[in-house]
Image (tube, rainbow, N blue to C red):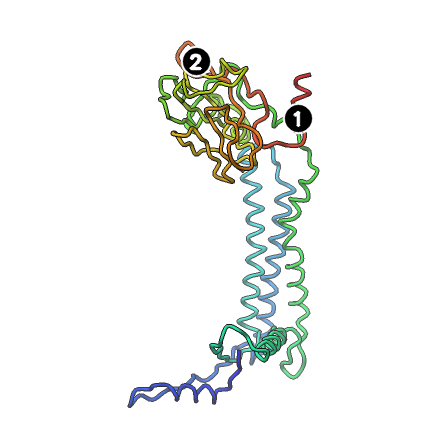
Amino acid sequence: MTHHDDTSLTTEVEDTDVPAGFTDPGVADHEPRQADVDPKADRRAEWQVAAMFGISIIGTVIALVGYFTSDLDGSVASVRSANLWIGLGIALAMAGIGFGAIHWARTMMRDHEMVEERHELRSSDETRAAAIQNLKDGAADSGLGVEKFGGVRRRGLLKGSLITALAIAPLSLLVPQIANMGGDWDISKFAHTLWTRGTRLARDPEGTPIKASDVTIGSVFHVIPENLYESEHWIEEKAKAVVLLLRLKPEDLNIQPGREDWSFDGIIAYSKICTHVGCPVALYEQQTHHLLCPCHQSTFDVANGARVVFGPAKRPLPQLPIAVDDEGYIVAQDDFAEPVGPSYWERLTHIENEEA
Ligand code: FES
């Protein structure tokens, strides 16, 4: 980057093709900004920038207060309220710093004209040295400790408000993470779902029950328990209870030992929660009977107990034992026989305790 005075700029323009009879007006006269000529305007701009950094500080406080005072009782309304205040706070915190920095640059940093010349990508040693010098100039141009109005203005207010805003802004993101570490995790919540004996399998999200006659060979249904929306914490329950219901030709289905009565005439149900890290498994390839998880490509063989045939998942998808009731609707025989979703450290202990 090279600094030019007005004379050199004019010379460069004169060298270009200028149509005959056209008078090059040259570079317009430099107009100083108000803050450069009026101490009051300079002071006003300084307060405006500080006010924006102040808004950032307030935003961080709002996010933290929103996090700690939200009564997260599991209802959708409480989650929405907490998200509103935390989101609003973070937005103010980031916007305050951003707008403050822009206003600072526009009103108080040194106002001189510059030309950035094209050059080869590879920097010469001189250019590198010049770049370092530019950085130093930039630091000098920031307006902190600038010589103005017959003295050095230290801008302690700006420095203090910017440092405070930058220092506390990460708290709105970090504190919730830290506060959640070592939290009150009730691991037993992961071990059971809403499925119980006789619960009808229903379409997601309508909640209409599914008849065995609706499930044609090759079709896939995204399924929830029929009574899901009666649950106070239905969002959390849905995250655990979602199921994929498929129908294969009975002769293609390799029924696993001990599960002889868990399916009905080729209709079979598996948990939709990937056993890797819990994405919804939703891509079904009818010809190969493979279910693919879109997150990391774990692939499960539906015809063979949903065992893993590819990818990072380590366990088959848990199977939901199903039957058909008197009216022809598909119902669960019971809950899953094992916890759904990713493995976690107390999972085995929990199964052992349940079996004991
Ligand atoms: S979450 Fe399914 S493969 Fe990773």
Image quarter of residue 135: bottom right
Secondary structure of the residue carrying tag 1 is helix
Image quarter of residue 146: bottom right
| Relative to 171, residue 323 above or below | above
Query: Residue at image x 45%, y 21%?
Result: 268
Of residues 118 and 85, which is closer to you in this image? 118
Q: Is mark 1 within 8 Å of ligand 1?
A: no
**Viewer-side label of 1, 2:** 1
| Relative to 326, residue 251 above or below | below
Q: Is mark 2 within 8 Å of ligand 1?
A: no
| Relative to 277, residue 338 above or below | above
User: In the rendered image, which residue does mark 2 sit on?
Assistant: 324
Identify the residue at the far top of this view.
326
Q: Locate residue 19 relative to residue 276 in the image: left or right.
A: left
Q: Position of residue 284 (x, y in %)?
A: 42, 32
Query: Residue at image x 53%, y 39%?
Result: 80
Q: Position of residue 203 (x, y in %)?
A: 42, 25
Q: Position of residue 301 (x, y in %)?
A: 48, 28
Of residues 41 and 307, which is closer to you in this image? 307
The amino acid type, in three-letter code, at marker 2 is Val
The amino acid type, in three-letter code, at marker 1 is Leu
| Relative to 172, residue 197 above or below | above
Point out the image quarter for the C terminus.
Answer: top right
User: In the rendered image, which residue does mark 1 sit on?
Assistant: 348
How many C-alpha atoms fall within 10 Å of the one at disc 2: few (<14), some, or many (≥20)?
Answer: some
